[in-house]
Every structure is written in structure tokens, then in C-alpha cells.
Amino acid sequence: MLAWPGATATSFRLHEEDGVVTTLEAHRDQDGAVLLLSRTTRTVLAHIRVESTPTSVTLDGAAVVERATRAALDAAADGYVVEGGNLVWIKVPQSATGGARIHIRP
């Protein structure tokens, strides 16, 4: 999934194989870029364009570990890696309890 959060929130609905719809929303707020997933029934790999190199990434309020390379991210259960200064790959693990809120701060 590729997202480019802007000042105005955008969203789309993903019709999953189990018949349930997952809603994804992207926007910017005063603290950076935000990606909301209504549910994460499997591991999600998100590619997010941001305005500047992030200083931190959180998932549901908890710090996400920065990985050194994309290969290291692929091998890990979760984390993020920055490409080219303004492209962020984030790996969100499956959650049995619901969705996810990703916050990328510049």
C-alpha cells in the first residue's frame, strides 16, 4: 500500500477476502503524517511519502524500531526504514484486537 498524507484526509475501503471492509485513512496533522487502519487481520507493509525525514514513528502510541535496511525490515516482525529521506516503509504486525494508528513525526 502506498500513501501520501495531505492536509485533507483521504480514505479508501479495501474489500477483504473474508467479506469485511477495511478502511484506510491518511492525513497530516500538526505533528506529522498519520495513517489509520480500521483493522489489521494480517501483516501490513505500508509505503508512505512524507514531507521530510522522520525523527520518530509510533504505532498506537508506542515507538516503532527503525531498521537499518529494507532487508532488515523484511526479516523483522515490525519496524520501519527510511528511503531517500522522504519515503518510509512501515511493517505493521497482525492484530487480533483491531486496527492501527501510525504517526510519523518530522
Image (cartoon, rainbow, N blue to C red):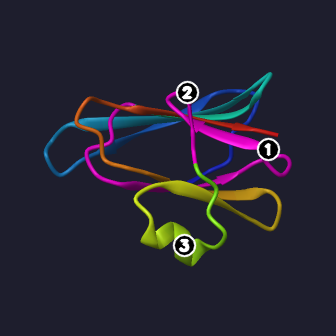
Between 95 and 65, the one nearer to me in the picture: 65
Closer to the chain start, of discs 3 and 1, is 1
Indicate the amino acid at tag 3.
Answer: Ala
**Image height of 73 relative to 16, above or below:** below
**Residue at 64% over, 56% down:** 66
**Residue at 57% over, 45% down:** 64
* Residue 48 appears in the rendering: yes
Between 37 and 76, the one nearer to me in the picture: 76
Indicate the amino acid at tag 2.
Answer: Gly
Residue 61 within the segment the image draws in magenta: yes
Q: Position of residue 72 (x, y in %)?
A: 54, 73
Q: Residue furthest left?
A: 18
**Residue at 37% over, 49% down:** 93
Local packing at callout 2 (Cα closer than 10 Å; few below 14, some 14-19, many 20+) is few
Q: Are marks 3 and 1 in contact (CB under 8 Å)?
A: no
Q: Kindly identify which residue carries mark 3.
A: 72
Q: Kindly identify which residue carries mark 2.
A: 61
Q: Which residues are magenta?
A: 38-64
As helix, strand or loop, the secondary structure at mark 1 comes to loop
As helix, strand or loop, the secondary structure at mark 3 comes to helix
**Image height of 67 relative to 19, above or below:** below
Q: Position of residue 86 (x, y in %)?
A: 80, 57
Distance between the alpha carbons at the discs numbered 1 and 2: 15 Å
Closer to the chain start, of discs 3 and 2, is 2
Q: Residue furthest bottom?
A: 71
Indicate the amino acid at tag 1.
Answer: Thr
Q: Kindly identify which residue carries mark 1.
A: 55
**Residue at 68% over, 47% down:** 4
